[in-house]
Each structure stands twice: as structure tokens, then as C-alpha cells.
């Protein structure tokens, strides 16, 4: 799971343009250069928002996996005792079909 979304890579490229096809300023007028600059700015803002939500989702996923892993780690030594506890509870409380 930790290879899927690299948080350091997402942070390093936080303000990189997001899926921008091409926005070359070479050989353009001032108006076109201004539009290209606004396009790049908008693309960087979208990239920052998408990457920020991806980082938040990744951190929440890591937290969830950490909690599940800790529960499994704590419950693993207890697993062999569960059948014995079930038999004891059955004898103490009784079974509904008897």
C-alpha cells in the first residue's frame, strides 16, 4: 500500500501543473502569453488541490491500516484460546437449542 501513493513525491510536486497538455509561450503575443500564464496558474492550483486531497486520503488510509494491524497483532496470541472460551461460555450460559 505504501508504494501506491508516495507522500514525499506528492509533496515535492504539490504545485506542479496538473495534466497540462502544452502551454508554450514561444512565439506568442502578450495577450496569449497572459492566457498561458493564467492557464498554468489554474493548472497548478488544481494540481495542488488534487494532491492535497490525495495526501489526506493516503494518511487516513495509513491510519486505518495501522489500527487494523495493531488489532490483529493484539488478537493473534488470543486466537487459540477462543474455542476454549466458547465452550466455557456455552456451559456457563447454556445453549438455546437444549
Image: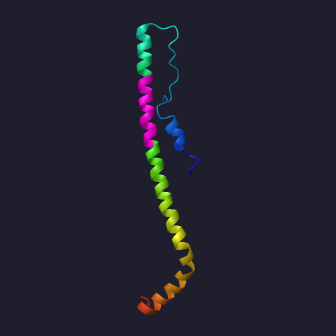
Q: Residue at x 44, y 12 (%)?
A: 33
User: The C terminus lies in which quarter of the figure?
Assistant: bottom left
- Whether residue 98 appears in this view of the structure is no
Residue 62 in percent (x, y) is at 49, 54
Verify whether residue 45 appears in magenta: yes
Q: Is residue 19 above or below residue 26?
A: below
Residue 97 in percent (x, y) is at 44, 89
* Of residues 19 and 48, the one drawn nearer to the viewer in this rendering: 48
Q: Is residue 58 above or below residue 9?
A: below
Q: Residue at x 43, y 46 (%)?
A: 56
Q: Residue at x 43, y 92 (%)?
A: 92
Verify whether residue 48 appears in magenta: yes
* Of residues 8 and 75, the one drawn nearer to the viewer in this rendering: 8
* Of residues 91 and 49, the one drawn nearer to the viewer in this rendering: 49
- Whether residue 87 appears in this view of the structure is yes
Residue 44 in percent (x, y) is at 44, 28
**In this rendering, would 32 be left or right of 7?**
left
Which residues fall within the magenta stretch? Answer: 40-53
Residue 72 in percent (x, y) is at 53, 68
Q: Residue at x 55, y 44 (%)?
A: 6
| Residue 95, image quadrant | bottom left
Q: Main secondary structure of the magenta part?
A: helix
Amino acid at each position: 500500500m505504501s508504494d501506491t501513493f508516495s507522500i514525499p513525491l506528492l509533496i515535492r510536486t504539490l504545485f506542479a501543473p496538473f495534466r497540462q497538455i502544452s502551454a508554450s509561450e514561444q512565439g506568442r503575443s502578450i495577450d496569449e502569453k497572459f492566457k498561458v500564464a493564467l492557464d498554468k496558474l489554474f493548472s497548478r492550483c488544481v494540481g495542488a488541490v488534487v494532491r492535497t486531497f490525495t495526501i489526506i486520503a493516503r494518511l487516513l488510509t495509513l491510519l486505518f491500516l495501522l489500527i487494523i494491524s495493531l488489532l490483529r497483532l493484539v488478537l493473534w496470541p488470543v486466537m487459540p484460546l477462543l474455542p476454549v472460551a466458547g465452550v466455557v461460555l456455552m456451559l456457563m450460559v447454556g445453549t438455546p437449542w437444549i
